[in-house]
Image: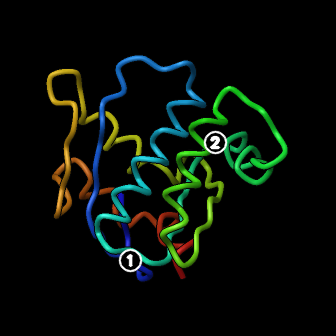
Amino acid sequence: MLQDHEGQFQGAQAKWIGHCLSALAAEALACVEGASLALRRGVHKLEIETDCQVLVKLWESRTSQRSEISPILSRLEDICRDFRDVRLSFVPRTCNQVAHICAQLASADNPLVEWLSPPMELQSHLHVPCNLDSHE
């Protein structure tokens, strides 16, 4: 989900990942897709939030590590070169509910879903305080 600096909904996307090496790889691919969406929408400063601390640590040490997701991190790094500023940060799982709800809305039958306005399933989760704290 994209939010502006005031926490206002700016769009969202969910993409079905049929087969993946691990939950870590799936989370990294979700970050790639999110960064790609932000780039298409003209975002200049990007903060990617994830509830996967391992991913954040691998991102921070991406030049000196060789993990199973190194190729995915390289793709993310390539996309991120087009932003003025990028940060990948950890948020508790309870603060990442919107992303999990979006992910559940994609399926093999509906592999790519994009919203310009928030779908009904997200309405009650958009103004949860922890989703706004990191954008102030």
| Left or right of 108 on screen, residue 75 | right
Q: In which quarter of the image is the C terminus?
A: bottom right
Quadrant hosting residue 102: top left
In the rendered view, would you say 43 is above or below 62?
below
Name the residue that disc number 1 marks. Answer: 4
The one of 9 and 28 positioned closer to us in this rendering: 28
Asked which secondary structure carries label 2, the reply is loop
The amino acid pointed to by label 1 is: Asp
CA neighbours of label 1 inside 10 A, class few (<14), some (14 to 19), many (20+): some
> At x 38% / y 51%, what residue is drawn?
98
Q: Which mark is residue 92?
A: none
Question: Tag 1's secondary structure?
Answer: loop
14 relative to 92, above or below: above
Whichever of callouts 2 and 1 sits on the residue coming sooner in the sequence is: 1
Q: Name the residue under label 2.
A: 52
- What's under tag 2, amino acid-wise? Cys
